[in-house]
Each structure stands twice: as C-alpha cells, then as structure tokens.
Image (tube, rainbow, N blue to C red):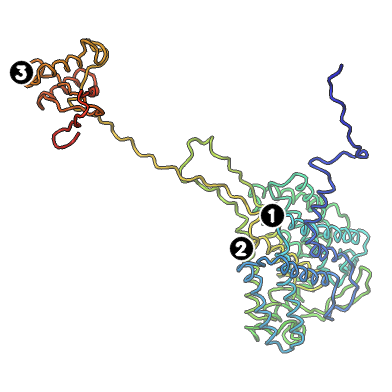
Amino acid sequence: MSLAPPPVRRRSTGGASPARGGPAAPRWRARLAHAAPLAPAVATVLLLAVPVAAGDVSTSGKVTPADAASAVLVLWCALRLAGTRRRPLGRLGAFVLGAPVVGFAAATVTSLDPGTGVAGFLRYVQVFVLVPAAVVLLLRDRRDFAVVAGAVVVLALVQGGVGVWQYATRTGASYAGQDVRAVGTFGPSDVMGMATVVAYGLVIAAAYALAPGGSRRLRLGALACAGALAVPLVVSFSRGTWIATAVACAAMTLLAGRRQALRVGAVAAASACVLVGGVGVGSQMIGQRVASITQVTSTPDSSVTDRYALWGAAVSMWREHPVTGVGLKRFPDERDSHASLALSSGSDTAGAGQAFAREPLLSPHNMYLLVLSEQGLLGCALLTGSWAALLVAGTARLRPRRPRRFADPLPHPRTRPPVRRTGPPACGLAAVGLLLWTCVDFLYADIGGPATVLTALVLGLCAWWPLHPGRDLAGSPRRRRPVPPPAPPVLPALPVRPVRRPSWAVEEPDDAPDGGHDGAPGSTNARLREGANDDPNHGADHGSDDEHRPAAAPRTTGRTAPARSTAGPTARRSTARSARAGGTTAPAAVPAQDPRPDAAPLTRPGGRP
C-alpha cells in the first residue's frame, strides 16, 4: 500500500508561464491606472509629431493640436485640484512661478496696442506660468517624471528619424543650395523646431545614462537613444543647439561624477570623429558649419549679420522704454525704426515640400533681448530671476547629503550601519540639464512656432525637481534613518574606601583556631557570652588580657541591633587595629536575645539604636 499523496491537478495556462510575482495583467492594469492622470501631458508631447500646414508666419492666432492639448492639460489639472482639495503649491513654488505675471501685466497695461498686448499676455502666461504649473502639480513622483520624459524621448526619436531620412534622401529644407537640412515635420519655416525636440530628447537620455544607481538595461537603452539622437542633431545645422547641448551634457557629466568626465569626453570625441567621417558628402558642410561658430566676429555670414542688427534694435527699444518696454508683441512694429541698414528684409526658406518663400524677421533671435525690449527691465528681471532660482535650487538639491553623525561613536566600526553613497538621481540630472540647455539656447533663439508648447512642458519638468516635496519612487515620504538616543555619560570610577566597622561588630572567622562555628562550645562568641553572664564588670580593667575582647551583648526579642559594649573606647580601637593588622575583616556582631518577652529595645547613648 502506497502512502504517497495524490498528484495535484493544475489548470492549464495555455502554454504561457505566469509571470514571477503574480499575473502580468493586474500589474499592467495597475501601471496604466497610475499613469492615467498623465494622459493630457503625454498627449501634448506626442501631438507635436503631427505635421503642421504651412502658412504665413506673420499672422498670429494659429492654434496647433499641441496648443489645444495644453489647454486641456491646464483644465484637467484644475479639476483634479478641485476634486482632491490638496494644497496646490508651496509659497516658494507660487512665488517662483507667479512672479513673471507681474511683468507681463505691467507690459500689457503700458502697451500702445492693447489688443496685441492682451494676446501676448495670454501667450506668455500659457508658456511660462500655466503649463509649467500644471506639470508640477500633476507629477507625483519620479515615475511620473520618467513617463513624461520618456514621451519626449519618443517624440525626439520620431522627429529625428524623419530628419535623418530628409538628409539622406535630400528632401529636407534648403541649406547652401541643397535640400539637406533636417527639419522633421515642422517644415522649413520652423527650422529650429526639430533641433529643439531632438536636443531635449538627447539631454534626457544622457541624464538617464549618466545617473549612477539605475538598472543596467535602462542605462544602456538611454545611451543608445542618446547616440541615435546625435545624428539628427548634427544634420539640423543649428549652431545654437549644438552649443547648448554641449554645455548641458558637460554640466551633467560633472554633476554625475568628476571621474566620468575624462571617460565621457574621450567617448564623445571618438563618436564625433566617426560621425563626421561617416556621413560622406555632408562632412564638408558640417565642418564648415562648425568652423563658422568661431568666425561670427571676424567674417560673419548673412544670418549672423541680421542677428546682430536685430540685437541692436532690441537694445535701442529698451533704452527708450527702460522700465516696462514697448509692449508685448510690439517688436515687429518697432523693428524698422530702431534697426540699422545692415538688416535684410527677411530670410529665404524653401524645400521640404514647400516652394520658395521669404519670411520676415519677427524677433531678435534672443529671448533675453526680446523680453527686455517688450517688457523692460521689470519683466526681464522677474522672468530671468525665476529661471535662475529654479536652476540654483535644482543644482543644490543634486548635492549628496552627508550621513548624520551620531552624538557618541559606536563601540566598534564593524557594528556601524553601512552608509550607502549614491549619486544624483536621473530625474534631477535631467531637470537641471534641460533648464541649463534652455537658458543657453535662449541666447540664440526665442519662443515661436509649434515647439513652444514643448518648451513650456519642459519648463514644468525643470520646476518639478526643486519644488516637489521630496517623495521617493513609491510616492511615500522618504524614510529617514532613526537617530539613536545619546548614550548616558560615562563617569570616572570613584576610589573605593574600606568600610570601618565598629568595635562591637568584630568577630573571629569560621576557620579561626580558637573554635568552630558561632555559638558552638569553645568558640570565641560563646566564651564572651559566658564571661559577660558571670562577671558584669568584665572588661573594666584595661590592663587585663580581656582588653582586646568585646563584651557580648544580651539578646532581645525582635531586636537585631547589638547592645553597648562595656569596654572603653581605647579597648574598642585596639581591637579594630588588631583585626586589621591580622589581615581579616571585622565580622558582624551576633544579635543577642533577651529572655524577657516584655523587654524594651536597647538604645545606644544619644538615643540611637
């Protein structure tokens, strides 16, 4: 008879093994439910891949699908705040994000064209206040940051792939007489659109590749994305984007670890050599474009000359209206009266499926000078001060926190808890890198075109890092290591002084040669008690041999204190000295018993027992 248990029948899974830790479907549902509130932000990013119909860039009021999605994003954020009733922003966040509104309002009120000023006010509030604040309020933890940043990288890969195809097939925008400039789906009228999107994706991918402590797969994937996005960035022929990307990546490398600077620099140099040498015919064009960066003062080309003229016009406008500027969106109207004669009538655009067109120059191609001319010193100080505060606060938050030192050192170094020192997180590196890239790129560009919505959303990512309340990946407050209470102070050991027992407490030890135990016949205590009973004046003579023997005290009922010795003080001191000289301690006296049941307690002189 077999005692083996019957086999357990298991249900068939259809050939698919279940995922470790539980079924895969509930996990994916949980992830989708967690990312559902981010749908408007992700949709705003991905809708930038939709091609925009070409039109006159001088006309205002064009609304792209991404602009409509950004309005839905702001409305969705307002509804969530009304439903959850949680505190929207702290004082620092409200001040940093809301301070530029004062400059926008002042420039609108003092503008000579109120209608244009109101339209400009709404656009500036959308780009620099509402959309960034909505992103800051929607992001709950670093996973949400990674979701939105991943959407930006996906958009950059799509636009970069289209741009590389345009360069390879010569179907891009016109550059140096050839249709080789990569512009993606933005068209030749917005040559900076694809370059901006690709640069944002490259900076995010580089941040996740440089950040220590991440998974190996994530870092390798981010490194592959960064390398792939470098190709469309190069063939965009945008010098300002190249400079901003180089500065941002160098800063992130130093923030991630100084030891990685040399290694990353060597890899970047080798990749640049392979990239420039492997593009074939375009290598000469890229080399000339790179060399023109150092020739902007000696032999500038026509685009650089026009830019210098526009910069001079912006400075002239600010000098006439130093406090509040000429008004929002008033730069095109005031340009001709302040620009020099070296300014051309416009820029030539062609290619990428569009015919030749001459586009007017509507901005100075410098965000700082544009704000200074239209909003004056007040608006420029508030807007740039907001960016500077975010950059300083974000960089300060990247610094590693030193481990707390206990009040008292632990007994042994091996028993101390291990201190894990990790580098800055990937989201922090990405936020600082994106903000630094934007600040540097604004030296050569400004807002305008469909990619402006992406700039607003990226500013929200940059503001979330220094303004979020410090939550970890799980969305719960960070657990700090408990600090043990301070140990009590160790006092020095006091010197032990021998206890001097009274003379009446001296007795012989058990192994004394005079006799056995206490009370046995022949013992010292027995002889003393017998002598005290026979002669009450025993011990009065100080010259006898019994001088060194204390008198036995009579016992009382319920009394343990010894009676007063009949020997004098000289005899008691002599007895104590003899006991110490003999190397033995004075034993305790044997309590005496009084045969009378109604005897009063014995007391020593002075009323003490």
User: Where is 375 relative to 198, above or below?
Assistant: below
Q: Tell me which label, 2 or 1, sits earlier in the chain.
A: 2
Disc 2 to disc 3, C-alpha distance: 98 Å
Q: Circle 3 sits in a helix, a strand or a loop, which is it?
A: loop
The answer, for residue 487, to whether it is visible in the render is: yes
What percent of the width, then of the height, locates residue 549?
14, 19
Mark identifier at residue 392: 2
Closer to the camera, 432 or 587?
587
What percent of the width, then of the height, locates residue 128?
71, 72
Q: Which amino acid does label 2 sit on?
A: Val
Mark identifier at residue 543: 3
Disc 2 to disc 1, C-alpha distance: 25 Å
Q: In which quarter of the image is the N terminus?
A: top right
Which residue, given by chain and number where applicable, does mark 1 sit on? 475
> In the figure, is residue 137 to the left or right of 545?
right
Q: Circle 2 sits in a helix, a strand or a loop, which is it?
A: helix
User: Where is 148 relative to 588, above or below?
Assistant: below
Image quadrant where residue 3 sits: top right
Q: Tell me which label, 2 or 3, sits earlier in the chain.
A: 2
Q: Tell me which label, 3 or 1, sits earlier in the chain.
A: 1
Q: Quadrant of the C terminus?
A: top left
Image quadrant where residue 523 sits: top left
Q: Which amino acid does label 3 sit on?
A: Gly
Q: What residue type is labelled 1?
A: Gly
